[in-house]
Image (spheres, grey):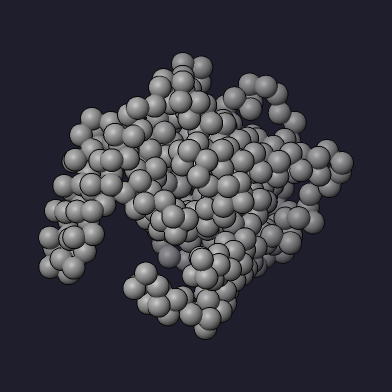
Amino acid sequence: MQKAPIVQKSFSSWKIKLAILLGVGISLWMLYRGISEERFIPVENKSGDYNWIDANGDGNVNSNLSAEFIAVPKGDYVKQTFTYALSAIRWNSKTFLWLGVALLFMVGRDFFYMLRIRLLTKKELTWKSSFSVIMLWEFASALSPGVVGGAAVAMFILKREKIALGRSTAIVLITTLFDNLFYIILIPFVFLFIGQADLFPTETAGSLTVQYVFWIGFSVILFLSLFLFTAIFIAPQLAGKLLVTICRLPFLTKWRDRATKTGEDIVLAATEFKKENLFYWIKLFLITCGSWISRYLVINAVLQAFLVLGFMDHILILGKQLVLWLFMLISPTPGASGVAEYAFGELLSGFSESALLLATMAIIWRLISYFPYLFIGAVMLPRWLGKKNKG
């Protein structure tokens, strides 16, 4: 109770308004950058307006560097912008139908996330609170580098929803574990049905590097999953000791007592979760599968909107998304911006000879699956903070 004035002061009216301006400003800037980016796309029969000149002498076609291209009457490249790409698409009822399906899959993804957080909190969160938690969690993830994610913010969000910090930590760790578990289990099945040559791009010079990065990343995820399983289900004291050890650093010593309390809460939460039966964990895993499959099917629906694809094509696209997701996970940019679009074009180039169309589909995919969370989160965060302060 004594800390209430401090919290209220921390989230005062002007700071909430500043959060709105910053959130909306960042969202608009990232959206503008996404739709205003220029790329030079190769075309056939000298039907373009530019030629590549290799201005920096690196021997690579840097499609996003205007200095690498010179205007000519009959060139091998055209300058691709978002508006130019949209004008080149033949829009019809099939296109709008499948883009609508892609939006439904996004809604499905968030529904499964809400279902999972309600299950993990034993329905202490209402559907409305669950929606707020998931939207703000996605907002934090969208603004964080892929390698960082929004886990730390998620713990804060759950704590503000009156879930003890230690239990919040345990919940976030379990969601991370089950997300990784889905990935680890699915990879062997993918390689049973899809050859390695089909999963990875073979026509690019860095194709071998892509494979190395993928398997190194997979190994890291496997190790992290084993650590999380140990920290939650075998030796939860390990997580508490790790927190206390970290807080021994000179600039973190003031948090040592809180870290000790959080460690104790993690042990209590882990003990509570251990009491759950097998059906509980199966249900949790199936819900996790539902959320990830919905996430992946967004790309399938976007591609189906512009291309004619068969059943096996969709299976291959799902497999390729496992590679795409890993590169988004290790991306140093906020929300994997840039990396996601580039990897999309590289991995799915076999489905269309038009680099222009692939670039357009990548932007549309991000407009559906990424940018909405920036705007929703930017609007929700200040209102949510203000409401929690009053509570």
Seen in the picture, residue 59 relative to 37 is either above or below; the reply is: above
- In the image, taking residue 158 as reference, residue 382 lies left or right, namely right
Question: Residue at 26% of width from left, 52% of height from top?
Answer: 262
What residue occupies the far front of the structure in this picture?
A: 1
**Would you say residue 220 is visible in this rendering?**
no
Question: Residue at 64% of width from left, 39% of height from top?
Answer: 108
When asked about the image quadrant of residue 301, the answer is: top right
- In the image, taking residue 139 as reference, residue 72 lies left or right, namely right
What residue occupies the far top of the structure in this picture?
A: 192
Seen in the picture, residue 221 relative to 125 is either above or below; the reply is: above
Q: Tell which of 87 and 50 is nearer to you.
A: 87
Q: Tell which of 221 and 156 is nearer to you.
A: 156
Seen in the picture, residue 99 relative to 193 is either above or below; the reply is: below
Q: Tell which of 262 and 69 is nearer to you.
A: 262
**Would you say residue 97 is visible in this rendering?**
yes
What residue occupies the far right of the structure in this picture?
A: 93
Question: Residue at 15% of width from left, 66% of height from top?
Answer: 253
Question: Residue 321 in the image: x percent, y percent?
Answer: 52, 36
Question: Residue 77 in the image: x percent, y percent?
Answer: 64, 56
Q: Tell which of 197 and 364 is nearer to you.
A: 364
Question: Residue 110 in the image: x percent, y percent?
Answer: 60, 44
When asked about the image quadrant of residue 70, the answer is: bottom right
The N terminus - image quarter: bottom left
Question: Residue 362 in the image: x percent, y percent?
Answer: 62, 49
What residue occupies the far bottom of the structure in this picture?
A: 14
Please give the count of numbered marks on the rendered protein: 0
Question: Residue at 34% of width from left, 43% of height from top?
Answer: 170
